[in-house]
Image (cartoon, grey):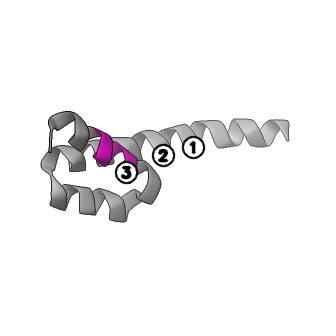
Amino acid sequence: MSLLAAQARGFALGTASHGIGAARAMQVDVDAGAYAGLALGIQVVLSAILIPLAARFL
């Protein structure tokens, strides 16, 4: 698997399936696991910032 494919696959797994996907990505490839963790972290931070802002306007 090429490096770019591992990064894309890891990012997709981290975003779509959270912790279980990140753990599985780490089993498949170290780079995929790293990007899965990064995606999971970014998603959590964005959710913590955007959900309260959206709730204020609803």
| Tag 1 residue | 47
The residue shown at (74%, 38%) is: 54
> Which stretch is magenta?
8-14
Measuring 30% from the left and 46% from the top, which residue is drawn there?
Answer: 9
Kindly indicate whether the residue at mark 3 contacts the one at mark 1 (C-beta within 8 angstroms): no
- Assign the C terminus to one quadrant of the image: top right
How far apart marks 1 and 2 lie (CA) works out to 5 Å
User: Is 48 left, or right, of 31 in this rendering?
Assistant: right
- Which labelled disc corresponds to residue 22? none
Question: Residue 38 location in percent, x, y?
Answer: 33, 41
Q: What residue type is labelled 3?
A: Gly
Would you say the residues marked 1 and 2 are in contact, meaning their CB atoms lie under 8 Å apart? yes
Pointer 3: what residue?
A: 14
Q: Which amino acid does label 2 sit on?
A: Val
Label 3: state its secondary structure. helix
- Residue extending farthest to the front is 1
Q: Name the residue under label 2.
A: 44
Give the position of the N terminus as an image quadrant: top left
